[in-house]
Each structure stands twice: as C-alpha cells, then as structure tokens.
Image (cartoon, helix red, strand yellow):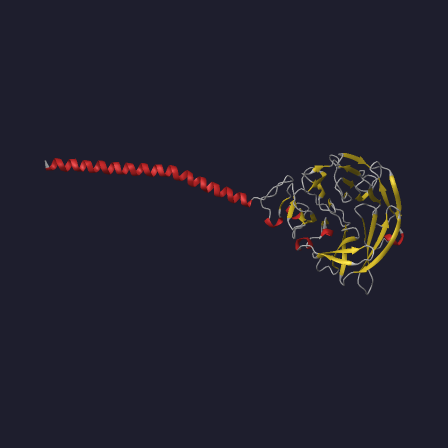
Amino acid sequence: MGDVLDQVAGTARRRRSTRSRLVTGVSVVVAALVIVPVAFGATSLIGSINEASDRTTEGPYATSDKDEDDSSGDALPSTVDAPIRYAYRARCLVDDTEEGRCFEWRVVTAEGRQYVIYDAGVRTDPGGNQLLAITPDGNHIAYYNTSWSDFVIIDRRHSVPEESELVEVGQRLTKDTSLAISPSGRWVAAGFGTGGRARPTRVRDFTRRHNWTLPRRLHVLAVADDGTVTGTVGQVGGGRPVDLVRMRPNGRVLNRMRLDGPLLAPDLPVAAVTSPSGRTLAVVAEVARPGRATAVRVAIVDAVAGRVRGSCLASLPPGTEVRRVHGWGGAREVVVETGSSSGKSDRVSSATAVEVLSCRLRDIALDGRAEAHPHWALGALNES
C-alpha cells in the first residue's frame, strides 16, 4: 500500500506540475499577444507624433524639401495674419547657383514671422529687376511661379495663387523682364525687354480676368489702379536716349517725354523708380565727389506733365555707396540700399529712406538675415 500511495502521489505531483507549466505557458502567450500589439502601436504613435512635429507645414504653393532648415520658416500659407513688410532672397555662401533652397524667397510680416515661397523665381540683374513685387500695404504679392511658368498674384488674407497668363507657353524669361503690381493688387504688368525681338508688354486685370497686349515694348516701372502703365523705352543709365511713357491698357499713349541731359548723365550709376501710381518718377544717381563723401542726387519728374520738378543732393556717411534703389517706401520717400564702398564688407548692407524733396536721410531697421543678403523687395516698410 505504501508503494502504491507513493506512486499515486508522484503522479498527482507530476500532473499538477504539468498543469502549472501549461497555465504559465498559456498566460505568457496571452500576455504576449496583448502586450506586443499595444507596444507596437504605442511606438508607431510616438513615431508619428515625432515625425509630424518635425514636418514643415506645407501651404498650397509648393512642397518643401525634407532637409529644409527650420530657421527658414514654414511654407507660405493661404492666410497670413499680418501684412508683408518686405521679402528677401537668401543666398548660399559657397558654390552659389540659381537653384536650391539657398535662393528661395522669404517674406517677413509686420509681426516678424517668416514664410518661404518655394516656387518663386529668383532671376535678378544688377539693374534691380526681380520677379517679385509687393503692394505698398503688404496685402498682395506678385511673383514668377516656376512651377506654373507664369506670373501669379496672391492675396495674403484669403487666397491661393491666381494665374495671370502673361507668359506665353514655352516663353523663356530674360534679365530684361520687369514686373509691377498696382497698389490695390488688381493689376499686374510685365515687360519682357524693349528690343525688336522681345515679347510685347502685357497687362492683366485680375478683377475682370482680362489681359491686354500693349503695342509698345516697355521696361515696366509701375502700373496704377486704373491700369495705366508707366515705363521706359530704352534702358535708363545706358547712355542712350530714354523715353518715359504712360499708356492705357488699350494701347492709348497718355503722354511721352524724353529723359536726357544732365538728368541721365551716362557716366553715373542711375536708377529710376516710380511712385505706386506711376505719376511721379524719382531718378536716383550716385555722385562721386573727390575728397568728399559720396552723395545721392534725387531728381523728381512729373510723369503726367512731362517735366522735371526739382532735385536735391544728400551726402552719404563716409565710406558708403549706393548698391540698389528698391523703390518708393511711402508717398515722399525712396528706399535705397547702402553699403561699404571699400568692398571689404560687401555682404553687409543697410536700408535708407531718402525724402525726395529735401534729401533728408532716415535709416530703416531690418533683421540681420535681410541685411546679409543683397536682394530684397519692400512691401509695407513705410508702416513701421
């Protein structure tokens, strides 16, 4: 009986041990089936959150590169809360090319926010032509859209890019291309050079969605809110006769005057910019004076009456020169960019407003990134 009891007890122990191992094994398997998916899901969720936090916000204008530097700002959204104060184009420090993120345009709002326009054209020439323009109130931007191969306009408050159809299919832009936008953003005019082989100057009314082709090839300086285009025939500062022309979209010439004589001396760097209405032309020239500081001469031309109203002269700070004339920063001021005349600090520049009647100078504060790059377009600078 003792042996029998021992065998029965051993068998019972083995069964309990086997059952315990079975229960333990099943428990482990069940736990694995529950825990692994949960852990995998949590890991995926965390990864998605991290990926979303690193992803650059994309607007309806373009797709940013994955390697884009966070300091460059987000893509320009369809709604911008504040007026555009100015725009600037970045530049690479090494191996400069007209491609890639180093040349992208960035807009800076009145509140200091920056946004990138990834598909804005970057062609700029020493004469100041650039394929981006902003209305004086900072609400509209016109630029050459490289994705659409056409000029577009956007209202920063409630729109996406609207195509202009000013550039013909297959047309290639040159350094002579000029662009202007009316103060309200209703009109955009584009000139493609004044030579005999250049494409005709074209104008678009975005309210009526209608285009006009002008009978004369103009270097476009301005387009008014009534569609009147102000431009020049001939290159200002090129040493040849230059005519200032004001023309309606239907081709009717309102007035034409010759810009010649000491106003456009061929041996001086000259730039002519018009007021947003196109009725006043400011001809800005840098005057070298041996033994004295360089000066800026501003001549005011009444484009309607066809006569010079007057001029003034302002001395620049010692060791500085004019690098670019950006346009009118208000009703009475022209904005110029000045920098060192020695060439040692050619990447450092500053913006200066010149009062056109008295030539009184006033510094304009821009952030460091705009000051370090030579190409920028003013918007609502006069509001600051």
Q: Looking at this rendering, what residue extends furthest in the bottom direction? A: 291
Location of the N terminus by quadrant is top left
Q: Is residue 278 above or below residue 249?
A: below
Name the residue located 48 percent from the left edge and 41 percent from the top edge. 45
Q: Is residue 293 above or below residue 120?
A: below
Residue 175 on image: x %, y %: 76, 45
How many marks on residues? 0
Residue 62 on image: x %, y %: 64, 40
Residue closest to the eye, 236 or 83:
83
Q: Is residue 361 above or below residue 183?
A: below
Residue 220 image-quadrant placement = top right
Locate residue 357 relative to residue 38 in the image: left or right: right
The answer, for residue 236, to whether it is visible in the render is no
The answer, for residue 27, to whether it is visible in the render is yes
Residue 343 on image: x %, y %: 73, 59
Residue 255 on image: x %, y %: 88, 43
